[in-house]
Image (spheres, rainbow, N blue to C red):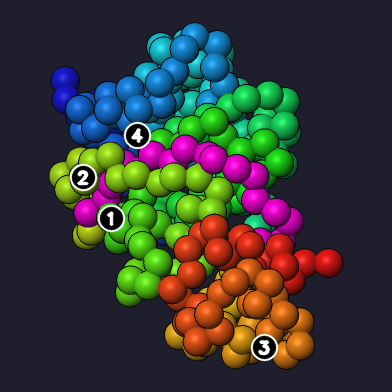
């Protein structure tokens, strides 16, 4: 039986159907699933957070690889299916929203992350993919590795270079904390039901912790991304004197536009402005 048929049978047996409002596009590509698990480089006993496990096709593979898995599922019906199917096999399941707010992950994810090294592996729903990744990267103990599916355009934005049209606050924050790499592009046929856009497997490897408030500051200054540095900082609420002093302290040309700064330069500028 194909993976699509297996998922359809599981849903039908539970009286369920994919919910568009929750962004439910279940992965049915065996090769993509295998690649995602391979990219996580799991060893038995490693701890993994999965967001949006759906019917558990990825979850099963993570458990078979010997991982200790915490899965967070918003859909009550799917949570019931997973409780019967995979909790007896060791899955730690949370029924709830993976996001406590736009800038906070579910408390159980934060607890799990705080208890020791962990990885993030998931077929992320499109509408929460960016905040989940950014909030995970900003944790005091970020994941050792994140391998997730996201919308293709989102993957391109997260891997964009400074000064490009796709470069923005999300890319600056994620690249300030680590290195994102597109592993593989996935067409709509890799999922059921088929989305109207392509997706990507994205791998992110951390390199350093983010300073407090960096993400919020990035979003504020990128609202004036095309303005020169002193003006962009002032538009974000910084007084002129400290703004000019910070630009000078970092050795930056004040005629440069905010959007041209590299992640390292963004971090240095944020540090120069932080008491």
**Disc 3 or disc 2, which is closer to the eye?**
3
Whether residue 71 is visible here, answered yes or no, is no
What is the quadrant of the C terminus in the image? bottom right
Q: Earlier in the sequence, mark 4 or mark 2?
A: 4
**Secondary structure under the numbered disc 4 in the rendered image:** helix
- Which mark's residue is nearer the viewer, 1 or 3? 3
The residue at 76%/82% (across/down) is 242
State the residue position of label 1: 152
Q: Is residue 199 magenta?
A: yes
For disc 2, the marked residue is: 186
The image shows residue 175 at horizontal and vertical percentages of: 48, 53
Q: Give SS at disc 1.
A: helix
* 81 to 85, vertically: above or below: below
Q: Which residue shows up at 47% across the image and 82% down it?
A: 257
| Residue topped by disc 3 | 234
- Total tally of numbered discs in the picture: 4
Highlighted range, magenta: 198-215
Helix, strand or loop status at disc 2: strand
Q: CA distance from mark 4 to mark 2?
A: 23 Å
Of circles 4 and 2, which is in front?
2
Question: Dots 4 and 3: beta carbons under 8 Å?
Answer: no
Q: Nearer the viewer, residue 30 or 209?
A: 209
């Amino acid at each position: 039986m194909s993976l699509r048929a297996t998922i359809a049978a599981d849903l039908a047996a539970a009286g369920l159907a994919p919910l568009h409002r929750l962004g439910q596009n279940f992965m049915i590509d065996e090769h993509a699933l295998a690649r995602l698990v391979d990219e996580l480089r799991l060893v038995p006993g490693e701890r993994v957070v999965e967001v949006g496990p759906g019917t558990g096709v990825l979850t099963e593979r993570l458990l078979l690889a010997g991982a200790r898995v915490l899965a967070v599922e918003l859909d009550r019906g799917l949570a019931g299916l997973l409780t019967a199917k995979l909790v007896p096999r060791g899955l730690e399941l949370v029924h709830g929203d993976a996001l406590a707010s736009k800038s906070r992950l579910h408390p159980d994810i934060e607890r799990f992350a705080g208890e020791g090294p962990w990885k993030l592996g998931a077929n992320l729903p499109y509408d929460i993919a960016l905040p989940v990744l950014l909030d995970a990267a900003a944790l005091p103990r970020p994941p050792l590795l994140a391998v997730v599916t996201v919308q293709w355009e989102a993957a391109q934005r997260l891997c964009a270079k400074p000064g490009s049209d796709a470069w923005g606050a999300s890319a600056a924050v994620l690249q300030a904390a680590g290195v994102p790499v597109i592993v593989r592009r996935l067409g709509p046929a890799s999922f059921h039901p088929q989305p109207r856009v392509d997706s990507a497997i994205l791998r992110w490897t951390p390199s350093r912790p983010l300073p407090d408030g960096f993400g919020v500051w990035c979003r504020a200054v990128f609202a004036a991304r095309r303005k020169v540095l002193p003006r962009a900082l002032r538009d974000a609420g910084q007084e002129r004197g400290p703004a000019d002093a910070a630009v000078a302290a970092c050795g930056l040309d004040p005629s440069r536009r905010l959007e041209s700064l590299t992640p390292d330069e963004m971090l240095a500028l944020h540090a120069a402005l932080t008491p």
